[in-house]
Amino acid sequence: MRRASFLALALFGIALFGFPAAAFGQAPSADSQTLQALLTEVRALRQDLRISLARVQSAQILLSRLQIQQAAVTRASEHLDDSRSKLAEVQVVQKSETAELKHFQDALIVADSPEQQKEVQDSINRVQGDLDASASVEQQRQTTEIDAEQQLRTEQAKLDALETQLDDLVKKVGEPSEQPGPAPH
């Protein structure tokens, strides 16, 4: 009776699974090697995915920093333009005051009366004071312009460094990962 039930079980195993029931718990070695190769490849793909995600995150952070730095360069450039404009205004005023001073100095030479000479001399003194004040303002504006130029150079250098980093990152995107996985099967 036991033989019959064992035989029935063996036949049932062969009919159902295509292999004897006695070999049910054993895996062929070829399947084991295939599973191991697949597991290794999945792990390599997971590592590649981690590296790619890290690069994408780095690129996003770098792009944000790049946008912020471009805004800083724009602000510095606008500040420089404003400084140059204000300096040019002062220089125009100085030219006008210099011409006015020359006019009054010429008028002093041809002045007839002492009252007229005093009036012209007072005008000369006023214009000379304005010219001195303009010279002081010009010097301040030149200092501001120099500072603005330096700030623009500094901000531009930072932007250039970020652009270089972004270029390097773009090059790395096309490269294989640092830890290459096994060759595909």
Image (tube, rainbow, N blue to C red):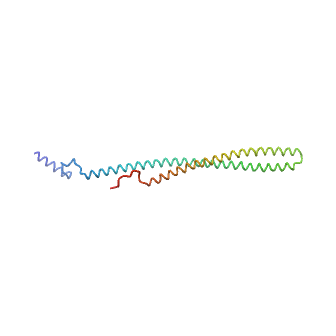
Whether residue 172 sits left or right of residue 100 in the image: it is: left
Whether residue 127 sits left or right of residue 16 in the image: it is: right
Q: Residue at x 83, y 45 (%)?
A: 121
In x, y percent, where is residue 55?
45, 49
In x, y percent, where is residue 127?
78, 45
Which residue occupies the extreme front position in the image? 179
Q: Residue at x 19, y 49 (%)?
A: 23
Quarter of the rendering occupied by the N terminus: top left
In x, y percent, where is residue 77?
61, 49
- The number of discs equals 0
Query: Residue 165 versus residue 112: which sits nearer the camera?
Result: 165
Query: Residue 86 versus residue 40: which sits nearer the camera?
Result: 40
Q: Residue at x 41, y 54 (%)?
A: 176
In x, y percent, where is residue 39?
32, 49
Quarter of the rendering occupied by the C terminus: bottom left
Q: Residue at x 51, y 52 (%)?
A: 164
Which residue occupies the extreme left position in the image? 1
Which residue occupies the extreme right position in the image? 113
